[in-house]
Image (tube, grey):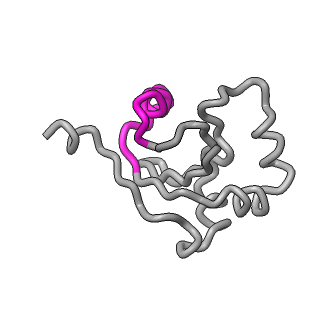
Amino acid sequence: MKALMLITGSGPMVILTSFDSVTHPELLKRLQAKGIERFFAHEIPLDLAEQRYGGHYQVVLHDLHESDDLRVLDYNGERAFGLFRLHELGSAIIYDPELRAA
């Protein structure tokens, strides 16, 4: 499982995913289905995400209504961005399908 902060056109959000990469084709399809076509992503250490979100992390992790492949941990961009210091995030991964097609 990975925790990722995605910075999208509508702001930051935090997701949990079982995919090994944020650019995995199946994960990109799931994000696109949610209206997310391009983004900056930063990996968050799982233990840090669990610590910052507390019981909410466990609820989302065990929510049977969501796919194991993609679970939204936090869609409130202000809260998501405020919970983590920039130096705690992994290196930026930039995804823009137009750049890949060029």
8 left or right of 13 in image = left
Q: Which residue is drawn at 78% across and 25% down?
A: 64
* Residue at the outermost front position: 20
Residue 15: x and y, percent?
Answer: 61, 45
Camera-side residue: 31 or 43? 43
The answer to which of 50 and 79 lies nearer the viewer is 50
The verdict on residue 31 being magenta is yes
Q: Quadrant of residue 97?
A: top left
Q: In this view, does 83 lie to the left or right of 6?
A: right
Above or below residue 47? Residue 84 is below
> Measured from the top left, where is residue 9 in percent x and y?
41, 48
24, 11: nearer the viewer: 24
Q: In which quarter of the image is the N terminus?
A: top right
**Residue 45 falls in which quadrant of the image?**
bottom right
| Residue extending furthest toward the right | 55
Q: What stretch is highlighted in magenta?
A: 23-39
Q: Which residue is drawn at 65% across and 36% down?
A: 71
Q: From the image, which quarter does the C terminus lie in?
A: top left
Is-magenta flag for residue 75?
no
Residue 6 horizontal side relative to residue 79, left or right: left
Residue 96 is situated, as x and y percent measured from the top left of the image, at: 30, 44
